[in-house]
Amino acid sequence: MKLSIVTLVYFLGIVFQANGQNASDQIYLGNGEIVEATVKKVEPNTITFSYLGENLENIVEKTEVLKIVFKSGREQAFNTSISSKGVVSADFEYPPMKSNEGAILPFEFVFDGAVAPEEGFEAQEFYYNNLMRKPERNTIAYQDPEVTRKRLRNAGITEANHMRDYEMEEIAKIVGAGIMVTGKITVDYRSTTSSSSGSTTTKVDAKKKRVKSYSSDYSTSMDEFNTKVLFRIYDKGGNKIVDVKRVPFLATTRDNYVTALNYLMKRTPYYQK
């Protein structure tokens, strides 16, 4: 009887110990994903693991990992600095990746030092609509800007400057496009130039022997802006394909940036003149 009690206590101890442990190792990634896996090796720069039920070994860079919670309950932290980066909403479902599709991301827009997100959306729409004027010249298909914005919103990104907190490789996964067009537009008011002119018209009435003179004055004013467009294109791996700056000549309206975008659009690798 004593032996049976000892045996029962022994097995209960095993059960409680097992319940106090995880069924697998848990890898916490910087993008918010938690991977249930079996960790094989932790090396200076990488972590090797296998998904549950698989023998195939996978490797992830340590820079992408926040921590590992081992099935024993022990935690090992790694790159805690990436916790300040953007984290995709937990309920976000990544769309299928279309490697040969382009996505026009919202442009960052700064006017007189203040962020102007709505104008960044307008720049995004302008670029897309300009591409669609002659779609036969595009060498890739482009995602509708509304689809792009919706996917970004669903992932928790509501303004263009919020994308700074994410790697471009992650942005590509969020929008599901292999080519991403983006950039930053800066517009600063410089001055207003005014000018005036006048003219006099004289009419002679021979019958009444009268001379009449008419005078008119005209005045005009023109605003001038300093405009700068930073234009970039990335691939799905986050690599820069295009990285250029253009300053429109004689910008007289705050939306004069469109001339620069039009010029740059026609010189990308994805447009045929």
Image (spheres, rainbow, N blue to C red):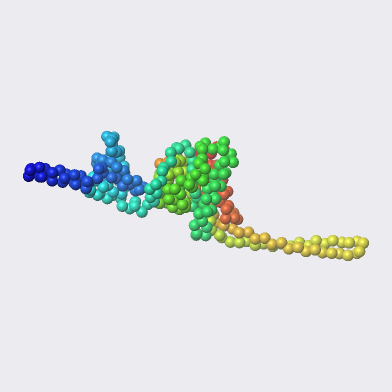
Looking at the image, residue 44 sits to the left or right of residue 146; the answer is left
Residue occupying the point 19% across, 44% down: 15
Question: What x and y, as percent, mark residue 87?
Answer: 38, 50
Q: Position of residue 169 (x, y in %)?
A: 40, 44
- Residue displayed at 40% across by 49% down: 89
Q: Is residue 157 left or right of residue 219?
A: left
Residue furthest to the top in view is 55
Total numbered labels = 0
Q: Nearest the camera: 180 or 158?
A: 158
Q: Residue furthest right?
A: 207
- The structure residue drawn at horizontal position 91% and vertical position 64%, both measured from the top left corner, is 208
Whether residue 207 is visible to the viewer of this picture, yes or no, is yes
Residue 4, located in which quarter of the rendered image?
top left
Q: Quadrant of the C terminus?
A: top right
* Left or right of residue 103: residue 17: left
Q: Position of residue 203 (x, y in %)?
A: 84, 61
| Image quarter in which the N terminus is found | top left
Outermost residue toward the front in this view:
1
Q: Residue at x 56, y 60 (%)?
A: 190
Q: Is 28 or 255 nearer to us in this picture?
A: 28
Q: Position of residue 259 (x, y in %)?
A: 58, 48
Tell me, yes or no, if residue 185 can be seen here: no
